[in-house]
Amino acid sequence: MKIASIFAVGWIGFCAIASFASAEDAHTMIVPDDVKWAAAPKMLPAGAEVAVLFGNPTKEGLFVLRLKVPSGYAIAPHTHPADEVVTVISGTAMLGMGEAADRSATKALPAGSFFALPPDMAHFVYFDEETVVQVTTNGPWGLKYVNPSDDPQTSQ
């Protein structure tokens, strides 16, 4: 429950400025120029931006978000509580599986690539160039670092 509480607090500022579409809406259409970026939640390393396109990551149900990261960005080995479906929109994601961040064991996923991970599958990712990925999953969204000292919320 502690992780959920920390997660919820991290999203308060973001949710205040984001506009969420819901499944009750008739439809949602967003063109690239209408994507509204904000600082990513504190569960991610500093420097990333996020744009919620559909749903609400803090509540139960389907949501879609885009994550924009700068060159040199990395997310240490972690898991998610639900299936995660990801499409690389621009740039290249270097995805690795497992509990140790072995960069030599990653696969380069350029723009247009797709991957899907089941709940609780340990993985890590880094980026050698600015990259945008689109994540589709069910909320509430969570991220649990394999090594708790990698969590930006506790290592500050």
Image: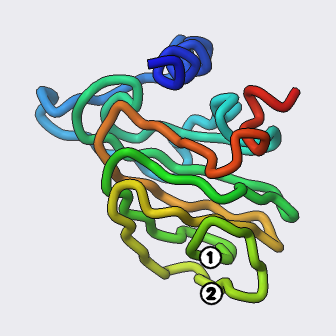
Q: Which quarter of the picture shows residue 37?
A: top right
- Give 25 or 142, whichever is nearer the viewer: 142
Is 90 situated above or below 146?
Answer: below
Tag 1: amino acid:
Gly
* CB within 8 Å, label 2 to label 1: yes
In the picture, the disc for residue 155 is: none
Q: Tag 2, which secondary structure?
A: strand
Which residue does the image show at 35% across and 55% down from the upper left?
A: 119
- Quadrant of the frame with the N terminus: top left
Question: Helix or strand or loop: what does disc 1 sit on?
Answer: strand
Name the residue that disc number 1 marks: 96
Q: Which residue is mark 2?
A: 107
* Residue 6 on image: x %, y %: 58, 18
Q: Earlier in the sequence, mark 2 or mark 1?
A: 1
Q: Which residue is at a point 32% across and 41% down the rendered structure image?
A: 63
Q: Nearer the viewer, residue 2 or 44?
A: 2
Can residue 122 be seen in this snapshot? yes
**Quadrant where the image shows the C terminus:** top right
Q: Residue at x 53, y 11 (%)?
A: 16
Q: Is residue 92 left or right of residue 103?
A: left
